[in-house]
Image (cartoon, grey):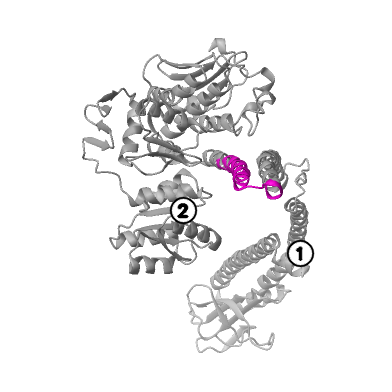
Amino acid sequence: MTRILLIEDDSETAEAIVAELADRGFEVQWSPDGVDGLDRARSSGPDAMIVDRMLPGMDGLTVIEALRKEQLRTPVLVLSALGAVDDRVRGLRMGGDDYLTKPFAIVELVARIEALLRRPIDSRETTLHVGPLELDLIERTARRNEREIDLLPREFRLLEYMMRRSDQLLTRAMLLEEVWNYKFVPATTNLIDVHMGRLRHKVDGPGEPQLIHNVRGSGFILRSRQ
Amino acid sequence: MRQIQFIRSNTFLWALAVAAAFALFVVGLFAFIYWKLDDYLITRSDRMITTQINFIADLPSGRRVNAISDHLAQDSRGVQYAGLFDADGTRIAGNIDRVPRGLHLDGAVQGVRLDLIEKLAAHDPIIRSVGRRLDDGDILVMGRNVDETREISSVVGQALALGLLPAFCLCLLAGAWLSVRAQRRVEEVNQRVQRIVAGELRERLPEDSADDPFARLARIVNGMLDEMEAMINALAGVGNDIAHDLRTPLTRARLALERGRTHAATLEQLQEVTDRAIAGIDQSLAIITALLRLTEIEDNRRTAGFDDVALDEILREVCDVYEPIAEDKDIGLGVVIDRNVQVLGDRDLLFEAIANLVDNAVKFTPPGGRVKLELTSDDETALVRVIDSGPGISEQEREAVLRRFYRSDKMRNTPGVGLGLSLVAAIVKLHGFRLIVGPAPGGRIEILAWTRGTPRAAACGSKVLLHANANEM
């Protein structure tokens, strides 16, 4: 079972996160402060960690820094009420793998943890395969079984990102950050949906089983199996 | 308490120090005068007795005794001394009992103790004297009492002391007065400042017309207070706007939850209610996020991280992002780039600004319209222009759209937070560029940037041009 260590001082937030992750089959350990959290991280060796930035005793970033110094490469998701771009950059520079600003939707948190646990396919591959889909990264071509898919560059980028993370829930925020390199929330809220609609229209032709799925209120999944 | 304060006050201490220095100076002056006077009188009397002894020594020996008697008889004040002794030291004439010990004969005038026949005081005074051995073996001694020097000195000293005391007192009084006056003014300023701290923002420091440092300081502080009052009032206005805009979605969320709690009969109904509530809360959060972002940009000192930014690339990317959205609304979105141009700035922020402009243009242009992105440049400037066939911004609304949370009444029902243009304005301001809002009809917003290498001085007048005639640009 995948084990996750949560270091968070607010017990109500922690409770909600623990309950949600447990529902999804994770084994969650909760630690209310930085010093205790660091001890547990060393002793129990979790598969991933969620660390709040502001902690009593020891600051969240200090915990991560200490772990990284000891060559512990456990993926870490940083939670913070500080949302400024500079804070985010600092959080990632100190060794965090991803950064989520409070308040967040719980599905967003779960999606990001799952993304951290499943690192994307090796980037040295020149061809990506997901189910009937094949993406040639050198020729910049895409095909579904025998059918050529004609993609615009931005659609190609999006599909590549999704194929590297197939069967994972990808939230709108993740796509905005990673594919479009957005550092802010666009005023038009359905920006991603429109782009995804175009891509889906091309990938899932008439009569073909659906590969790109819209998860209501959360994001999108590219499924390799039906 | 007040007394101690007043004595400790700086002004008073300074006055005390000045008074002490003055007294020291006067005492020094007195000492100098005394020394000079003493020196002068002694030199004069030495000259006199030297002349006298020469005169008597030159007389034939028989007339000396008479000459000495005459000399002493003429001296009404009793300051002259003379004595004639034979070779053994026995007195022949004069009022000196014997040849003083320690007097060098045939030497210069010197101060020695004389043994007088008639004792002057309790002790024999030191008297300027000169002795000479005469050609017939007799010894002639002549002297002069210079105690009168001391008398004159004491008169001068008394006069100075008499002047010194009142001067010293005057100094102290002036110091005390200045100190009390300064303290009273500080106290007055303190009281007013306390009132300002307590929230009475309209209070000001007293400004009398005098051009003293206090009045000048008060004028400076009052200028600062004017600025701060204006800023605080503006902030309060923003606070009201935020409260209002946050209330709307929160009210919706609350109503939905309340109704759902009472009326929802099935799980589906409850879920629908919850979704509505979450949407309301999400909108509130979006407002807070946008607001924090605005503050972040306005506060930011990130100009240090500025780098070369290719505006043409940004325009193409923004166009790329918004093309499908425009297409869905049946709006033609085009980009025209005169030539590639680089400016000094923050790429992410400039992208955000231009994306916001295009977002707005697409949102407010009715279906079937057009949105055009243009980039023109010359040697010094680059102009990013976002033009749309929508309603544009009317004369009355031009200034208001840049305010936080302003949303045109016509657009009340259009989704959005209403911070878009103020965000753009903040980013443009941070870069020292200019934001130009063109006249309606038709949306027309321009960002005038200075290309790489243009002196920053040209960019100093960064501000929003509201009434520029777009046709002239």
Residue A151, quarter of the rendered image: top left
Please give the label number shown on residue B343: none
Mark 2 vs mark 1, CA separation in Å? 73 Å
Whether A158 is among the magenta residues is: no
Q: Point out residue B98 in the picture as x, y percentages from the top left corner.
A: 57, 87
**Label 2: how many residues lie within 10 Å, few (<14), some (14-19) or many (20+)?**
many
| Residue at point 40%, 58% (across, down) | A26
Q: What residue type is labelled 1?
A: Cys
Question: B329 or B171, which lies in front?
Answer: B329
Q: Which amino acid does label 2 sit on?
A: Leu
The answer as to whether the residues below labels 2 and 1 share one chain is no
User: Pointer 2 and pointer 1: residues touching (CB < 8 Å)?
Assistant: no
Question: B372 or A16, which lies in front?
Answer: A16
Question: B302 or B260, which lies in front?
Answer: B260
Question: B92 or A144, which lies in front?
Answer: A144
Magenta segment main secondary structure: helix
| Residue at point 54%, 27% (across, down) | B462
Give, as a single range, the part of the protein colored magenta. B260-289
User: Which residue in the protein does label 2 denote?
Assistant: A79
Q: In this view, does A186 lie to the left or right of A66?
A: right
- Counting every numbered tag in the picture gives 2
| Residue at point 35%, 62% (across, down) | A46
Image mark 2: chain: A
Image mark 1: chain: B
Q: In this view, does B65 lie above or below A35?
A: below
User: Which residue in the protein does label 1 denote?
Assistant: B169
**Label 1: how many residues lie within 10 Å, few (<14), some (14-19) or many (20+)?**
few
Note whether residue A187 is visible.
yes
